Amino acid sequence: MSTETEATGAEVTPTDHLRQGVLDTLAGELGADLLDAHLVAGDDLWVRVATTAWRRAAEVCRSRLGMHYFCFLSAIDWQPSPWGRGEDDPTAPPPERPTEVVQGVAGGDTRFQVFARVYSVTSKVGLTLKADVDDAHPAIETWTGVYAGANWHERETWEMFGVEFTGHPALRNLYLPSDFEGHPLRKDFPLLARMVKPWPGIVDVEPMPGGDEEETAEGEGA
Amino acid sequence: MTAITDRQQLAYIAGQAADARVNVEVETEGMTLNIGPQHPATHGTLRIIARLDGEQVVSVDPVMGYMHRGYEKLTEVRSYPQVTTLVNRIDWLGSFANEVPFILAAEKLMGVEAPPRAQWIRTVLFELSRVANVILFLGDMGVQLGALTPVFYAFRDREHVLNQIEAATGGRFHPNFDRIGGLKDDLPKGWIAETRAVMVKVRSFCDEMEDLLMGSEIFEARCRGVGVIPPDVGLAYGLSGANIRASGVDWDLRRDGDTPLVWNEVDWKVWTHPDGDSFARYWVRLQETREASKIVDQLLDGIPSGPIMAKVPRIIKVPEGEAWVSTENPLGEMGYYVVSKGDTGPFRVKIRSASFNNISILPWVLRGVYVPDIITIMASLYFILGDIDR
C-alpha cells in the first residue's frame, strides 16, 4: 500500500523496478523465445513465451528469479462461444455471433493458450506466463519436473481443455469420470442446463421498466 | 518380588525392539485401504486410496470430483453480480472471504474503488469469516485425534461469530453481501459493540483450546514431527496460508499483497513456526485466530464514516482486460484470474482455490507414514472439499 501511495505522482514504484528486472532477466535468458510481454506499472506482468521454451521459462523463473511459489496453471480458450451465454429467446431466430478469435494481453496466435502464475515470496513479485498451443493437437511440455504442484493443475487442464502435457507422469482425469467424453471448459462444449431451458436470470440484465436510459444510469447505491 | 532395575528395563525394551524388527522383515503382502469418499476423517466426499505395506503407507492417491460443480464454466454464462452467489459456496465456512477477491478483480478491471468505509467493513467481515472458519478447525483437529470436547466448544463459539455475520449481512453461510463498488448495506446499530464482546469470547476460546489440546501429551505425541513439510517443497506444491507459514515462510498476503483492503492500517503480526509439522500448523492457526480477533478489534475502532457504495452503472459491464487478484483467505491464497471481453459477464475465470494446492502435497507427505498419521496430517492441512472441487 505504501508503495502505491508513492506512485500516484511519479508512476514508478520499487515493485516496478523489480518487475522490469524480472522482464529483463527473462529476455536475457530466453532471447527470441520471449515472444511478447505486457507490463502494467504498479499492477502486474504478463509474459508470452514460445511453446518450445515453456519448460525452460519455468526453470528460469525458479532458479534465476527465485520464484519458488507455484500459484496455478490453466488454459484459456479464446474462441467465442458459439452458444452465447444462453440468454436468448428460444423462439427467436439465432443471433449473429462473433467468431473471430481475439487474444488478450501479451497477444497470441492460436485458439488455446496455456497460462500459469509463479510468485516470489521474498521479493513479493508475481508473473503470469503464457504459451500458445496448437489447435489441432494441443500439447506442451510438462512443468512437473520444475514445480511439483503443477501435477494436479495439468491434469485438470488436460481434462477440461484437452491440452496434453508431454512427460507428465500420470495424465488422467482429476474431477471427471474416466469415460467422460469432451472437454467441458472449451467454449464449444455446451452448457446443457442452458440448452434445455432458458436461464431465468435473464431478467436481471434486462432494462428496468420505465427506464429509457441504458447502462449510463445512476448507480443504485448513490 | 524385586524391583526391576533401569538396566533390566532397557534390556527388555531392546529385546522387544529387536523382535519387532524381525517382524518387519517378514514378507508382508501389499494392501489397499480406501478412506472415504464418505468418512469422518475426510471432512466431505474425498476418497483416499492408500496402498499399505503392513501399517506403513507406500503410496496415496486422493480422488476428488465427487462435488465438482463446474464453477469456471458457470461463470462464463452469468453476469458479474450473479457470480458472487457461486463463489460464496467454494469455501463454505469462510464464504464472505471468497467474494472479496472476485469483486476486487472486477473493480480493478473497471477502475472502480470502493469508498473507505466499505473497505473497512469488508476487512472486518473478512476477518470475521476467517475466525468463524478457523475456529472449526481448532476444534476439529481434536476430534481427529480422539478428543471430542474441543469441537463442541468450537461449534458453540462459532455460533457467536456467525450471529454477527448474520446481523450485518443477513446470511450465516452465504452472505452475498459484497457488491462491485462497495457493500449492499451499512452496519446495523449496536453491531460494533456486540462484535467486540464476541471477540472477547473468541480469545477465551483460544485459551481453552490451548489448555485442552496443546498441553495434552497425546496431542503432542501424535502431532510433533508428523507430516513435516520443508519450505521449499511446500512452495513448489503451492502451499499457502497457515500451512506454509508453519514451515517457516514469513509470507502473508494481508501484509504483502496489494489489495485496497485495510490490514496495513492496523497493528498486527504474522505468525510463523519453524517446525513444519502438524503441531506447527495447529499452533500457527491458533495464534492467527487470536491475531484476527485483535485485528477486528482495532478495525472496529477506526471505521470511517461516509458512503458504502461507489457510483457504478446499474448494468455492470466490465471493460476488456485481464486481472489477477488474490487475498489471504482462511485456507490460504485464494485468487481469481478474470478475463473480460467487455461483456456483462466474464469471458473466463480461473479460480485458484487454496485447498486444491494444499491437498496436492498429500501423495508426497503421506508416503511412509503410518495409517493413523494420515488422519493427523489431513486434519492439520485443513481443507474444505468445496475449495478443492469448485
Image (cartoon, coloured by chain):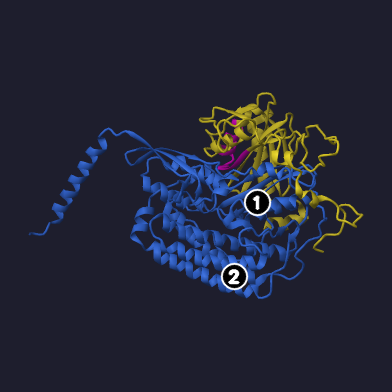
Judge whether residue A70 is colored magenta: yes
First of labels 1, 2 by sequence position: 1
Quadrant showing the N terminus of chain B = bottom left
Given the image, on which type of amino acid does mark 1 rest?
Answer: Val
Residue A200 rendering spot, x and y as whole percentages: 76, 49
Disc 1 + disc 2, Cβ < 8 Å: no
Residue B329 is at least partly visible in this image:
no
Question: Are the residues under badges 1 and 2 in a single subunit?
Answer: yes
Per the model, the C-alpha gap separating discs 1 and 2 is 27 Å
* Residue bearing the label numbered 2: B297
Chain blue in the figure, letter: B
For chain A, give the colour: yellow
Residue B231 rendering spot, x and y as whole percentages: 48, 46
Magenta segment, which residues?
A: A55-73
Secondary structure under the numbered disc 2 in the rendered image: helix
Report the side of A217 relative to A21 (left or right). Answer: right
User: Residue farthest to the left?
Assistant: B1
